[in-house]
Image: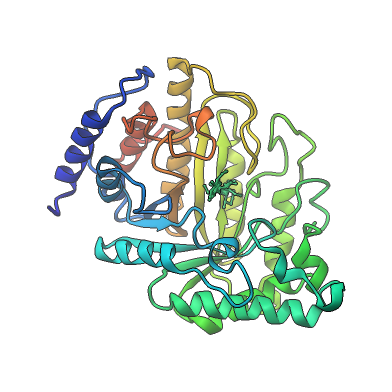
Amino acid sequence: MKNPVVYALVACALSLANAHGQDTGSATSVTNIGLKDAFAAKFLIGTAGDVPRGYSEAEVANIKANYNIITPENCMKPQSVHPSEDVFTWATPDALVKWCQDNNIKVWGHTLCWHAQTPGWFFQGTNGQPVTRELAMARLKSHILAEVGHYKGRVYGWDVVNEAIDDRNGGQTENLRNDSWFRAIGPDFLTLAFKWAHEADPDALLFYNDYNIDSDTNLDRGNPQYTGKHASSMLLLKRLLQEGAPINGVGIQGHWHLYTSISDVEKAITDYESLGLKVSISELDVTATGENSGAFPTRGGGGPVSPEALQQQAKVYAQLFDVFDRHAKTMSRVTLWGISDRRSWRSGQRPLLFDAQLQPKPALQAVLDVGAGKGMAH
Ligand code: G3I
């Protein structure tokens, strides 16, 4: 069954059959082809999840119908794959990669070097001392060579370094987070990580990935002091390029909300293009309710969402995809962070294109309309 229209209809039928009976008032009729087909000539459309284990038949059909690249949501992170120095746990990510290969879906590796979800052994020195720079470098190198090497030729690209820029007081400097990698190795840990990833798989695309780097102001309605992150990202990326880091692009995570500045997003994409970098939207979701907080969990939300909020969410999604569409030349991928509001890391804020029962939301049709050339007027 290779026809995408058939896939979409089957996905919809299976979703209906699988509905849990709770009416959110958000369902809309499906008059669509799959998302990936709507943007086939432009960029890849992805989702996140540790597929296929635990996914229902309806969810699997939905994934096959709509996405042509998957980011493992958790199972390729250092904590999952490399829990102690001599132990690698490949079973879950191996199953994901095989499933994707069997279904002609690409895999985006996430993530090799991050301050979170990284086990403490990386930073333990000998005799209770802090880890030395040399030992930390050796461990990071061996982790990257092992993981990228294990998936060589099977993973399309990697988030090599994730979220290295701090949230506050940025703009004048790179404002690197004072995290374990920074403290152990210094600011060159990023360039080194890119070089080791390239060494392990010269054909894989290598990206820097972060949240809130699309704006310098008003990033977070609850935390207005989070400023300057876009300017810091430009300083950091310029340095990486100067140092010869084999970096192909930058992932703007895209954990957004109803009041996200679309013009800031477009400016950020344009700025990254000016550096000769590819861009992806790597973890897209747009909250329909509650405060937004970049990469942090829900504050607020969880209650009913009004039809007006869902319409506003649809409008924001359409405006965003309209921007991505106009920058399709440098946009390599747009990945939604999850398949449905039930699967979302901030499910209480209903941020995705399919609702908790896997039913299409108004935002889905709005995005498909952009793909069909019926975008927003400017
Ligand atoms: O696997 C354990 C399970 O064994 C245990 O029973 C359960 C109990 O809480 O926890 C499970 O682990 C959870 C894991 O997700 C898998 O579901 C962790 O507690 C939970 O913290 C973890 O959250 C993930 C989060 O990253 C961790 O930082 C989210 O699913 C994932 O969506 C989120 O993704 C991040 C990106 O990697 C980077 N950018 C921001 C984005 C959102 O925070």
Question: Which color scheme does this rendered protein use?
Answer: rainbow
Location of residue 332 by image quarter: bottom left
- x%, y% of residue 248? 54, 69
Q: Is residue 267 left or right of residue 124?
A: left
Location of residue 151 by image quarter: bottom left
Q: Which residue is painted at 34% across and 54% down in the image?
A: 52
> 175 or 144: which is nearer to us?
144
Q: Is residue 38 visible?
A: no
Query: Where 153 sits versus 316, above or below?
Result: below
- x%, y% of residue 344? 48, 39
Q: Is residue 26 left or right of residue 77?
A: left
Q: Is residue 296 left or right of residue 101?
A: right
Q: Which residue is painted at 60% across and 47% down in the image?
A: 267
Q: Is residue 153 visible?
A: yes
Location of residue 247 by image quarter: bottom right
Q: Which residue is painted at 62% across and 42% down in the image?
A: 264
> 364 or 178: which is nearer to us?
178
**Number of numbered markers:** 0
| Residue sticking out furthest to the front | 127
Query: Where 215 sits versus 44, above or below?
Result: above
- x%, y% of residue 217? 72, 39
Q: Which residue is painted at 59% across and 29% down in the image?
A: 259
Query: Where 170 sits versus 315, above or below?
Result: below
Q: Is residue 83 left or right of residue 282?
A: right
- x%, y% of residue 262? 56, 37
